[in-house]
Amino acid sequence: MPKKEMKIFFIIPPNIHYIEPYAYVEADKSNTVRPCLGLLYVAAVLERDLGIETRIIDSNADGLTLNDLENILSKEKPDIVGFSVLTFNLLNCMEVCKIIKKQSPLSKICFGGWHPTLYPKETLELGCADYIVIGEGEQTFSDLVSYCKEKKGNGDRKLNAIKGLGYKAEDGSIIINPPRKSVQNLDGLPFPAYDLVDTTKYSNILACTGNSVTIMTSRGCPQKCVFCDLRRTPYRFRSPVNILEEIKFWVEKNVREFFIQDDNFTISRNRTIEFCRLVIDSDLDIKYKISSRVDFLDDELLCYLKSSGCYRIYFGIESGSQKILDYLEKGVTVEQIENTFRLAKKHGIDRCAYIMIGSYPESQRDIYKTLDLIKRIKPEHLHCSICAPMPKTYLYHKLLEEEVIKKDYWLEFAKNPDPAFKIPFFNQFFDSQKLRDLQNKIQKQFYLNPMIVLQEIKKTRGFKQFLMKSKMAFKLFSK
């Protein structure tokens, strides 16, 4: 009898529980749905190295409920179910795990992503996952699947050899294996397994065409912003030739808009220029948007970006107060912010400004400086978040040490996830509700500007995007 092929599912859970984030709540709750690139990369490696095709069930893209998942799992009974787990979607993943244990009790459950990476022991102690993947998951998960496929009663012996894996041993003890090194050669990874999902179901409220694809060209960040979980992590990047190959693949499928998901696409100036030249020489007629820092751009680089199809840049400017920029260790000046926005406008590139209010020492005067800066730089889009110390970031540890934060509440949540949890903010001058009120007011005032409204109407492409923007506007102005 031929050997049964392993059945592996990746599930993105429906949004059952909602933990209010630091982001603007109405934007966070919008019906924009993006692909989980991490899972698509893991799936691609499984297919390439083991010849195993996985199934990706994106509950949000497909509009699936817990009942729908229960029906699927009761029929399919997969061998392994994987989740990409963030602290903010942990509770939702746990809800699906309850269904798996009920409808398919022999299925093994694996958690990967930021949450189990930050809290490996606590994640396993929850009793949902049989395994966790710590750090980048492509090779670790592939090794785990190989182990499960070949297991012949050897207990935990082989599991001990899989770097980056955590699990519960047969005696109930928790084992955390040594870490695995980060992937150094990103060109060696296959392209994400987009063939496993319906790309037309993903959307972006600010896209300029009706069909766009998200791509990743680097990992890590060498910068030292205190609030970021990527602070000073190993920076690696794909070669321009490799990126262009992926773009050409999509152009052949009539996709001509791309969202480059990197936190800072322009860290390597030479790589950025080479990429732009390749795109220009290839005459692909594409459009794409990136994120960058104001200190990594100049007139020449912006000219290359515009000529190659870059139509929007997202900037994390955070504040118009130099005092706050220094506190956050941004490493930029207010003058640099103004100069870069002026240059981007000169080249006809849309500018989206991310600002962040409510860091611990920020006063009303500092917030006014930020609002004055927004008036001067005139971005096409604005996103206001609240400074919230995230799990195990430098800022979180700093405020714990200074006893501004009295207890390790993220650790408590990791041990006992509570649906009633609310993300706290810490500021000398404003309480949490006042910061939320300020955030809502800033967003509303920006988008009430008739010029902003008019430009958004002009840029709307198709009924789907019109509907998304209309819903967002209704939520914004009805508050």
Image: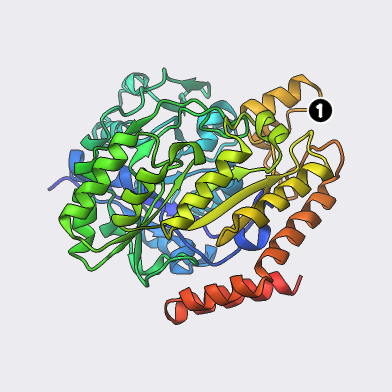
In this rendering, position of residue 461 left or right of residue 317: left
* Residue neighbourhood size for the residue with mark 1, other residues' Cα within 10 Å, grouped as few (<14), some (14–19), many (≥20): some
Q: Where is residue 135 in the image (x, y as percent from the top left)?
A: 43, 30
* Amino acid type indicated by mark 1: Val
**Where is residue 405, by image quadrant?**
top right
In this rendering, position of residue 49 left or right of residue 404: left
Q: Position of residue 243 (x, y in %)?
A: 25, 46
269 up-or-down from 13: above or below: above
Q: Quick one: 384 or 215, which is closer to the camera?
A: 384
Q: Quick one: 306 or 176, which is closer to the camera?
A: 306
Extreme residue in the left direction = 1
Residue under pointer 1: 404
440 up-or-down from 273: above or below: below
In this rendering, position of residue 474 left or right of residue 163: right
Q: Quick one: 311 or 360, which is closer to the camera?
A: 311
Extreme residue in the bottom direction = 463
82 up-or-down from 470: above or below: above
Q: Quick one: 40 or 272, which is closer to the camera?
A: 272
In this rendering, position of residue 372 left or right of residue 49: right
Q: Where is residue 450 in the image (x, y as percent from the top left)?
A: 65, 75
455 up-or-down from 364: above or below: below
In this view of the protein, can residue 97 be seen by the observer? no
